[in-house]
Image: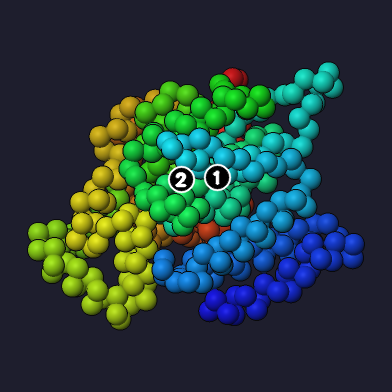
Amino acid sequence: MVHRMATNRRPCRRNGPNRARRQAPRNRTRGVFRAHNYYRTAEFFLDSDDPRRLPTYERSRETFRSALGLLDTPTQQVEIPYEDTTLPGYWFVPEASDNDGDGTEKSFPTVVCLGGFDSIAEELYFLCGVATALERGYSCLVFDGPGQGAPLRLEGLRARPDWEAVVGPVLDFLEEKSDANETRIALLGASMGGYYAPRAAAGDDRVSACIAFDHCFDLWSASAHGQERIANIVDHAPGAVVNALASFGARFDPGARWQLENSSWVFGTDAAALRRTVREYSLRDVADRITCPTLALAGEDDHLIPLPLVYEFVDAIAGPTTLRVFRTEEGAGEHCQLGNLSLAHGEIYDWLDDRFSGV
């Protein structure tokens, strides 16, 4: 598959920077973005120790950054101080940053995009609708956290449940940005970012609004939903038995194999220890500390996060909540509304416009 993806991307790259003078700028940019996505998709299914993985990831970043250079929107690659290292990301500002014409830089409401279990920062540009946000006058910050993108691949930083410790330094970084409005900062968490964003909002009052896209209230409950008896048996089985069963299942199910391998890589644990690790990713004990306005998005056909959990989520939050459940007939009933992202982006930024209109 990696070979086929690499073959597919070659025309896209040729249609990108190398033919700049012969193509319309918009088509050229789309071609380079497509090349990025071929590389990203090819890398996604490789084992963590596959020698092709890191070079494919680097090519994915390279082509994404090439496409950014073709945009009209001001874009800056950033390194966010975090513990004893940095988190890489991208800072996007609406095209007109001096709307008042007096030479002073204008500040914008800011959306901080958080990825999930298998995210890289670059894909958040598309998934979180950064282009839509910029059109509406929002600045955007997308970044890789621990367990994601470059920190995982290049430094071996595993996922952690206490994302207030990750987002805190990110908000510190934004305080140094004159074009970020500190009183209007929203966290937009995609997929498992629907856990990370509310978790951070519960621990930092600098967050003005929070969007869970999709919701991820309790990872263990989501994993066990519909198969509670099996989950209970697995929960009480000896670790050696759990690891053996997981390895056996991975031999016959490619999806199970990928899930097992990627979980081991992201969380740094085997299947047996994963039973304890997953339980740490729960908002049950912190949701009552979320006081900012919160938008919870859910799909009625979501195969990863069961719909009933979103109702527990909104009921547990202390602050004002808005719930939007997407239906099958809207083409948006799947996880993160991937069948109709434009609809989801409209809902997200309409809601943010309403929240920030009087601030």
Q: Quadrant of the C terminus?
A: top right
View extreme (front): residue: 84
| Circles 1 and 2: CB atoms closer than 8 Å | no
Give the residue number, with chain letter if any, for mark 1: 88
Q: In which quarter of the image is residue 331?
A: bottom right
Q: Where is residue 299 in the image (x, y as percent from the top left)?
A: 44, 54
Relative vertical location of residue 109 with respect to residue 91 in this rendering, above or below = above
Q: Is mark 2 on a helix, strand or loop?
A: loop
Residue linked to disc 2: 145
- Inspect the image, locate mark 1, and give the three-letter code of the amino acid beneath it: Pro
Up/down of 99 relative to 312, above or below: above
Look at 62% across and 75% down and name the residue there: 6
In which quadrant of the rendered view does residue 204 lie?
A: top left
Q: Where is residue 11 in the image (x, y as percent from the top left)?
A: 74, 74
Q: Distance between the residues labelled 1 and 2?
A: 8 Å
* Residue 40 placement, left or right of 303: right
**Vertical placement of 29 versus 94: above or below?**
below
Q: What element carries label 1?
A: strand
Where residue 211 appears, as percent x and y from the top left, is 48, 39
Q: Left of 21 or right of it: where is 97?
A: left
Q: Which residue is drawn at 43% across and 23% down?
A: 205
Task: Give me the residue at 57% from left, 40% from top.
Answer: 79
Q: Earlier in the sequence, mark 1 or mark 2?
A: 1
Q: What's under tag 2, amino acid-wise? A: Gly
Relative placement, left or right, of 9 versus 196 is: right
Tell me if mark 2 has few (under 14), some (14-19) or many (20+) residues whose alpha carbon lies within 10 angstroms of its own: many
